Image (spheres, helix red, strand yellow):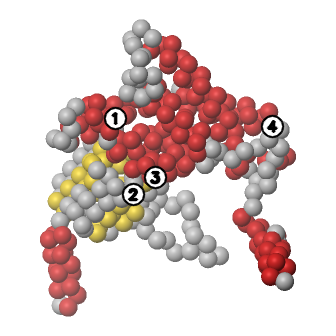
Amino acid sequence: MDLQKHSEVLDKTVEKLSDEASYRQLFHAYRDEEALPSGEVLKEIIDLCRAILFPGYYGNARISKQTIRFHTGVNIETLHSLLTRQIYAGLCFSDTNCSTCPEERIYTEAEKLSEAFIATLPDIRIQLGTDVEAAFNGDPAAQNINEVIFCYPGFRAICNYRIAHQLYMLGVPFIPRMITEMAHSETGIDIHPGAQIGNFFSIDHGTGTVIGETSVIGNHVRIFQGVSLAGEKLPPDENGNAIRGIARHPILDNHVTIYSNATLLGRIHIGEGATICGNVWITQDVPAGTIVSQLTVDKTVDMRNSTTKD
């Protein structure tokens, strides 16, 4: 009797979970031979990119000036093959009508996107070189450049971001966000691939740092752990849905420093050379060269209250 009752419970649960109304928005229909983008393969792709960009630090430890062309060539070929398959999976997954598309056309598009990304690797290396320099020059605890490249979580997160951002700019679906979320899991640093970040960027310590999708960051900007470049909450559209595609995160000019646990909210403008001290909540523009601390924020609030009472 107990076995029969147990079976009935399972059957009823299966019936409920198989009801189309239950899974309609949570179900993805696959085409033949299709697979979702793979987190494991993307990790391999990131490792390959790091080996190509920083030979000797990652990948084959025996690489030398005499063999670097050979090893780079092998890595590039492997990267192209793996990335093409992952982009192909992402293109299929993002297109709800993909079952009607010719497979060859989608794969050809994936190959072109993979080649276009690989062509940007020299520029990514140049940008990351400035980020390494910024991290080293900004942290007296860094013993040398090697330590920054091989050990620093902030640099690892920036490396993933630079790779993801190029894919994002090429219009590759899903893959860029997966790559930055891998860094998020590894380092606690959450950078949206759509953010625009200039050269000589550094994140010190970094745990809990969040940089939103439409953030714009200039050159020589340094931020610390727990900093949030957050988007303001917009009112819903006429149908009650969230409004998307609107710039809603901060703009940071060149040479801005933001210390730990500061929150910058909305499309505000932080002027060149400004310093935002720790544990402050900023919702208004900050003029160039200004130092904002908890004390200055409190004084501003007091002045407003006084004006309101008068």
Q: Which label belongs to residue 150? A: 1
Q: Read off the residue under disc 4.
A: 103
- Nearer to us: label 2 or label 3: 3
The residue drawn where x is 56% and y is 67% is: 243
Q: Read off the residue under disc 2.
A: 210
The quarter of the displayed image where residue 76 is located: top right
Q: Position of residue 169 (x, y in %)?
A: 54, 42
Q: Residues within 10 Å of mark 3 (few under 14, many from 20)?
A: few
The quarter of the displayed image where residue 236 is located: bottom right
Mark 4 vs 3, N-terminal side: 4
**Amino acid type, callout 4:** Glu
Q: Nearer the viewer, residue 32 or 13?
A: 13
User: Residue 264, relative to residue 156: is it above or below?
Assistant: below
Mark 3 vs 1, N-terminal side: 1
Mark 2 vs 4, N-terminal side: 4
The residue drawn where x is 79% and y is 55% is: 29
C-alpha span from label 2 to label 3: 13 Å
The residue drawn where x is 17% and y is 65% is: 293
